[in-house]
Image (cartoon, rainbow, N blue to C red):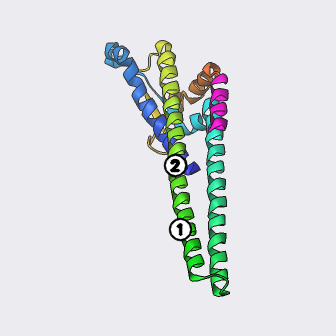
Amino acid sequence: MKKVFMALACVAVLASCNNAPKANDEQSAAAPSNELKIAFVEVDSIMTQYTFSKEYQEVLQKKANNIQSTLAAKQQALQAAAAKLQQDYQANALTQDQAQARQAAIQKQGQDLEALNARLSNEFQTETNKFNEALRDSIQNYIKVYNKDKNFTLILTKAGDNILYAAKALDITNEIIAGLNKAYKPAKTEKVEKTEVKK
């Protein structure tokens, strides 16, 4: 579940930064072609060093752990009930009607577990989407403000080896992370954590 969350988060960041130049289309269109300015940002560094991202990932990881613990406990209870039924049946401790009733109850328990798994997975996906959207908006808004003074024509995202070569001088990752962290208001994450507890 954590891998899924991280993959979704990375996709959200990639989308946000690739869309960021659109916010400055007017500036880009106005800039002469001989003044082309390009920069790039390391996505992985934002994910691991941006305080908002780190805090929200912790919230989501706690939620994922709670879901896994809940499902594991219910799965163990289901397996224990099935094993007890098998044991009692082999020991002739049950009538046919009793065995069928307990088997039906175990099947119902299994169906309930599947429904719970689906519901909790959907809730986790909704929370992850909420994080992705908030992260994307945060980065887009900051880059728009940042670029008012810098006047970059194009700001690229670097994730893994999607950029084969770029001079280190074009790397503005540390500036972006520093600016994002400075602009970040921790109170927003506290609100998210409180919401998480209520769920």
Question: Please, what is the dominant secondary structure of the magenta stretch?
Answer: helix
Which residue is at 61% across, 41% downward?
60
- Residue 5 among magenta residues: no
Closer to the camera: disc 1 or disc 2?
1
Image coordinates of residue 197 in percent, x first then y, are: 67, 37
Identify which amino acid the numbered label 1 is placed on.
Gln
Please tell me which residue lies in front, 35 or 47. 47
Asked if 198 appears above or below 177 in the picture, the reply is: below
Say which quarter of the image contains residue 180: top right
Quadrant of the rendered image containing residue 21 = top left
Location of residue 2 in the rendering, given as x and y in whole percent from the top left corner: 58, 49
Give the mark, 1 or 2, whose residue is nearer the N terminus. 1
Q: Can residue 103 be seen in this view?
A: yes
**Which residue has dot 2 on it?**
119
Q: Is residue 145 above or below residue 42?
A: above
Residue where numbered disc 1 is placed: 107
Q: Is mark 2 on a helix, strand or loop?
A: helix
Residue type pointed to by label 2 = Arg
- Above or below residue 87? Residue 127 is above
Q: Distance between the residues labelled 1 and 2?
A: 18 Å
